[in-house]
Image (tube, helix red, strand yellow):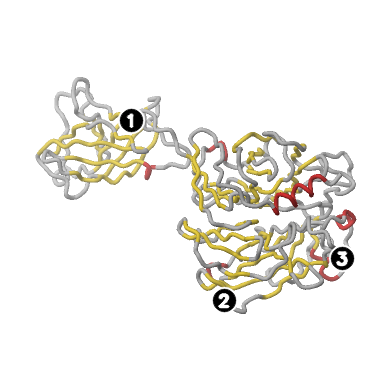
Amino acid sequence: MYRCFLLLIVLFLASLGPLKAATLPANFAETSITGLSSPTAMAIAPDGRIFVCQQGGALRVIKNGALLPAPFMTLSVDPAGERGLLGIAFDPGFATNNFLYVYYTVPSNPRHNRVSRFTANGDVVVPGSEAIILELNPLTSATNHNGGAIHFGPDGKLYIATGENATQSNSQTLNNMLGKILRINSDGSIPTDNPFFNQATGNNRSIWALGLRNPFTFAFQPGTGRMFINDVGQNTWEEINDGIAGSNYGWPTTEGPTTDINFRSPLFAYGHGLSPTTGFAITGGTFYNPATVQFPSSFVGKYFFADLGSGWIRVFDPATGTASAFATGISQPVDLKVGADGSLYYLSIGSGAVFRVQFNPPLGPAPVIATEENSDLAIALDSPSMSRDPFGLTNLINFSLTTDRQTRLSLFVSNLQLGAGENSSAVTARLQDASMNVFPLEVEFVGPLPGADGVSQVIAKLPANTPASQSLFVSVTLRGQTSNLARVRMK
């Protein structure tokens, strides 16, 4: 009956296996940062550092792609079963106040989970800076279903996911904080607009949603603030739920899709089993809405989620309510994040590593600068005057920085389509003179040429030291592929 949580316990206690790379879609590749011990959760700081919780109590820092040898801090925790150091979040004002928050299991009796704030001093904690924000309810002897994810919402409030500690009745009561999503202010006080503020008492007023079993991970969508909650199921279903204030998600009365009007049915649920579409524990989730889109545009707005038991990552489309495959062969993924650069990061407890997934667009054929028929003379426009050169003309236009003030080349290039997340900075251009000297050009614009399928326009600025009174050869490069040399005339 309890095979799901027993599997979780076994996996959390499993010894770390060898580093195992995922099977990814075509043109995706991953790199790894190893050396972690039983990692449970991670968060990306505003400056790009990755902070990783280790179940045994150490908070580790990955900086410039390397795991720092000294932990940021090491807490005394109870790491039994699914307990330990389980969640981390950065204060919205971290850049100025250096505050970060963690969720961990207190080892002294009565055992319970706690949310505390700490102050950073660079890559280490300020000694003695712990401020206890919220003490959760005492735990039973059961060591599973602790939840642990914490994130700041777009409203500046701290949201906390708690498991029901294997006591099903906890999920449906307002008399304790277990099996819930909690919402508090950053100082630990409770917002008066919480949905149960006037029904509950004391710290139970922090309850924002209930009826959850073990919401190990959840995420907010950048830009919209929409919240998805992953709830680990028991015998039949794993759930992705729409996070809405005051909702009751039905556990233990119902699991998976429901027509009961008293409960909010999941947006998506998948069944149990070891297959590319089934699993045993949904343990990671993140929206793909980065500041820089590095993946193909078809991924924007989608939700990545992982399953610890089956070792895969899939992609949920909120618009259609369907999911598709992304990665398989992962050793027990527990967390997912998207970086500002558009990379997808996943945390593997089985490999003791953080993996960074990036998209590498196929190279395709080299770009080709259009030239006059039977000639190496570039078909170009000087952008200030928009004069044609040469298009088969008998009187060719000469470029001059001094007399004509013709300072830009506007070239027409095939095989130069920009990919998702790319802009003009992805294209480089250069001139070469008769003595083989090379002059880099500033690329100002790259875009499709209207009415000419497959042709892009590239506008590049000539440098002030461009040699005069000679022919020059220009080329453009995209993704390591360089075009032909096309001649322009400088008088």
Q: Which residue is label 1 attached to?
A: 366
Position of the C terminus by quadrant: top left
- Residue in the picture at 64% in, 62% down: 88
Is 140 placed left or right of 19 in the picture? right
Amino acid bearing label 3:
Asn
Report helix, strand or loop for mark 2: loop
Amino acid bearing label 1:
Ala
Q: Which residue is label 3 attached to?
A: 198
**Compared to 112, does 220 lie above or below?**
above
Report helix, strand or loop for mark 1: loop
Q: Position of residue 272 (x, y in %)?
A: 77, 38
Q: Residues within 10 Å of mark 2 (few under 14, many from 20)?
A: some
Q: Give the Cα separation between the discs numbered 1 and 3.
A: 67 Å
Q: Which residue is label 2 attached to?
A: 126
Amino acid bearing label 2:
Val
Residue sitting nearer the eye, 349 or 427 = 349
